[in-house]
Amino acid sequence: MAKILLVEDDRSIVDHLNIFLKQEGFEVDTAMCQADALNMAAGSPYDLLLLDISLPDGSGYAVCTAVKAYYDVPVIFLTASGDEFSVVTGFDLGADDYIAKPFRPRELISRIKNVLRRYHRHGSTLEYGGIAVDTVKGVVSRDGEEIVLSALEYRLLLVFFNNRGIVLSRNKLLEEIWNIAGEFVNDNTLTVYIKRLREKIEKDPQKPEMIKTVRGLGYRLGD
């Protein structure tokens, strides 16, 4: 049974989701402010965090950052903010998904299960070019030193590792990360995230040896 911490300051949403999530078989704790959320998360590891962005004494961003400093945990943001800045900020802090209010409970359950599957899938360490990806812990390292990636960067890297030597078109890459960022991912955004990923994993980002551009076709990991 997955244990979820729901952090939300709207009592009606808390009461409704608390009942619904428990009916779906989840164990649920709730907090209505940043301070309570941090105390609860520090005292008891959770399998997933559902975080509202706007809290009376802080923000879900702060909770996400603080808790991930304790342990690796998947995060889904619940937000009334539909602007690109709020969504991208959450992903850059390590969030795995977001869902905008008002949302359908069944859609939220589906997203929760998808995120948990990604975190708990059985896997091994993928290695190439000095980069190692622990697919169970979600940790990426280069020559033994951990590299901090956002959720989108990590997802992109996994797509490349799982398709080593295969040319991936831009459309294919966009399809693979759509489930994380939805409408906020477009061709320009993809270019930005590939650039960021290269800056973190390549020895010389200006002359990439891992993620190579195949002119007119897309990108490929390795030869």
Image (tube, helix red, strand yellow):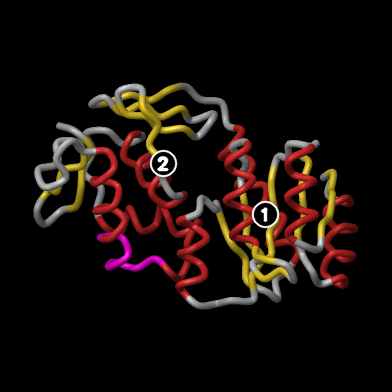
What amino acid does circle 2 point to?
Answer: Val
Q: Which residue is mark 1?
A: 110
Q: In which quadrant of the rendered view does residue 154 lie? A: top left
Q: Mark 2 to mark 1: distance in Å?
A: 27 Å
Q: Seen in the image, is 49 located left or right of residue 193?
A: right
The prevailing secondary structure element of the residues shown in magenta is helix
Q: Give the label on residue 148, or none.
A: 2
Percent of width and height locating residue 108: 69, 60
Seen at 55% across and 77% down, the residue is 82
How many C-alpha atoms fall within 10 Å of the one at disc 2: few (<14), some, or many (≥20)?
some
* First-in-chain label (2 vs 1): 1
Q: Quadrant of the N terminus?
A: top right
Q: Quadrant of the C terminus?
A: top left
SS of the residue under disc 2: loop
The front one of 57 and 116 is 57
Percent of width and height locating residue 11: 87, 70
Seen at 87% across and 66% down, the residue is 16
For the residues bearing labels 2 and 1, Cβ distance under 8 angstroms: no
SS of the residue under disc 1: helix
The front one of 53 and 160 is 53
